[in-house]
Amino acid sequence: MKALVLAGRLLFGAWMLLYGAAHFFALVHAPTGHEPLAIQLMAALVHSRLFDVAMAIQMVTGALILIGVLVPVALCVVMPISTCALYWSVILDHQPAGAVLALVAFALNGLLMLAYIDYYKGALQRYALALGESGRSSFDSMFVSPKGRASRGQFVPALITLVAVILFYAFLVTGRTAQWCLLMLLFPGVILHARRLHDMGHSAWLLAVPAVLMVAAFAIWLHILSLGTQLDAAVPVVALVVSAGFALWGCIGRGQVEANRFGAPVTV
């Protein structure tokens, strides 16, 4: 087995290194393709210089795989290129020779990753904590699971992070893509506020009000729903104001632990 892995690593590494280097020394040229979609995609990759980027990645990772340095990482980095080459050859271009080569490269890449599976076990954990994270403040506990609580000290940093992402999509991405991405951010926003309300002793069902308003606002922004000119202008404003109010409430509201500490009555 070790001999097979070594042979596969040397073959795949040399292949990636030589093909990538040959591209930059103009010994081989990017395939032009035979089918319309394959031709269009390859032309776009070449003219945008993205094909050069792919070949540079292929050359560097091939060298690392060949000499046995950072092999698991190099295999992961080059896998998307192997996948794209397979898709272009098999799905778009339909040429048997190119498809076979792309399939062999993809298979070698995948089999070598399986051979190094022990190095990926940490990355394959279902729940993993980043450096400095604790179980109480991890992404899963703040933005995924509605069960549990979020203290004010946990809520505020998580809210700032969420707002920063919202601002990124709203002002840097923009357009319809940004609107759909912002709509998806409603889920972690609701989860975060639900956990905060639990800590404050209130039902998370209160969030139905801002959630429904925000969904209606996005439906208007995406031209899926129209309530008339006046309501189309008013609903998004009301949704943003109500949502901001809940966020502010979460920032200044006192949790049950804080209420007990200062002798205030606890809401159940």
Image (cartoon, rainbow, N blue to C red):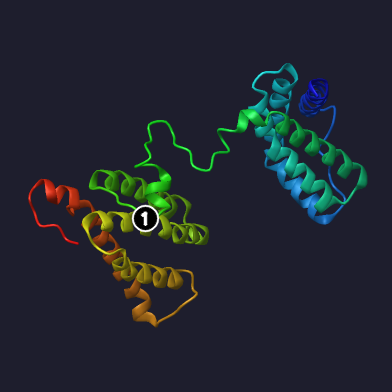
Q: Position of residue 113 (x, y in %)?
A: 71, 32
Residue occupied by mark 1: 147
- Position of 158 with respect to 113 (left or right) is left
Tag 1: residue type?
Lys
Q: Decide which of 243, 52 is in the foreground and name it.
A: 243
Can residue 51 be seen here?
A: yes
Q: Residue at x 55, y 33 (%)?
A: 122
Picture quadrant where residue 64 is located: top right
Q: Position of residue 140 (x, y in %)?
A: 43, 47
Can residue 55 be seen here?
A: no
Q: Residue at x 27, y 64 (%)?
A: 203
Q: Decide which of 183, 31 is in the foreground and name it.
A: 183
- Position of 261 with respect to 199 (left or right) is left
Q: Residue at x 80, y 23 (%)?
A: 14
Q: Quadrant of the C terminus?
A: bottom left
Q: Decide which of 58, 32 is in the foreground and name it.
A: 58
- Position of 69 with respect to 34 (left or right) is left
